[in-house]
Image (cartoon, rainbow, N blue to C red):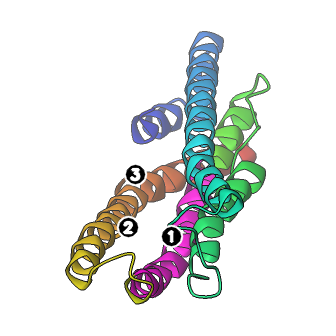
Amino acid sequence: MDYEALRNAWTSNANNPSAAASAYVIAEAQTTLANRRMHLRRLLAFAGVMLTIPLALMGVDIVTGQADVIDLSREWGLVPFALIPFAALILIAQRAAPSAAPTGTLLETFRALRADNAAARLRIVIIGASMVLFAPLLFVLLNQLVGTGKMAPHEMQSAALVLGGALALSACWMGVKYITQLAPERRHLEALVAQYEAT
C-alpha cells in the first residue's frame, strides 16, 4: 500500500474520507494482511521442514552408528548450530506473527497495519540476532570438522567462503529491507494513527 499517498489524501479531506473510500482502504488492508499472513505461514512451514531434515539425518546417524557417526564430544558445535535456527523459528512463530486484523474502522485498520509492520521488524531483529550467534559457531564447527578428519583444510576455506558469504548477503538484504521499506512504512502508519486518534 502507498502509505504516503494515503496520508496525504486523508489530510486533504480533513481526516474525513467518504464511506466508499474508507471501505476501499479497509478492504485493501484486509487483503494485504491476509496475503502477508499466508506468506509467513508458508515460509515458517518450509523453514520447519528444511530444519527438521538435517536434524533427522543426524539422529539416524547417531542411532545407527554409521561410519561417519557424529562425536558430540568433539563436534559439540553441531548442537547450537542446529538449535539456533529452530529457536529463531519458534520465536518468530510465537512473538512475530501478527494476528491483528481490521475491525471495520480506519483507525483499527491502520493499527492492524502498524502491528504487522512491528512484527516484520521484530522478525528481522530475531533473524539478525540468530545470525550474530550463528557466525562464530560456523567457524567453530568448521574447525571441529577439520579436527575430526571429516573436512580437509582447503574444503573448510571453501565452506567458510560460501556459508559466510551467504550470511553476509542475507544480513545486507535484511538491512536494506528494514531501512528502505519497513522503517518508512512505520513512519507513515504512525502518522496515520496519530491523525485519527487526534480526531
In front here: 131 or 39?
Answer: 131
List the single residue furthest toward the top.
Answer: 20
Q: What element carries label 3?
A: helix
Give residue 94's position: percent from left, percent from top.
78, 52
Q: What x and y, as percent, mark residue 9?
A: 46, 31
Query: Magenta segment range?
Result: 117-145
Question: What kind of residue is marked 1?
Answer: Gly
What is the spatial separation of the Cα atoms under label 1 and label 3, in whole angstroms?
A: 17 Å
Given contact means CB atoms under 8 Å apart, are the residues at marks 2 and 3 in contact? no
> Which residue is label 2 attached to?
171
Q: Quadrant of the C terminus?
A: top right
Alpha-carbon span between mark 2 and mark 1: 7 Å
The foreground one among 145 and 140 is 145
Residue 58 falls inside the magenta stretch: no
In the displayed structure, 127 sits above or below 191; it is: below
Location of mark 1 (residue): 128
Q: Which residue is drawn at 63% across and 25% down?
A: 34
Mark 1 and mark 2 in contact (Cβ < 8 Å)? yes
In the picture of the structure, the residue carrying the numbered disc 3 is 181
Residue 77 in view here: yes
Residue 1's tag is none
> Distance from label 2 to label 3 (Cα)?
15 Å
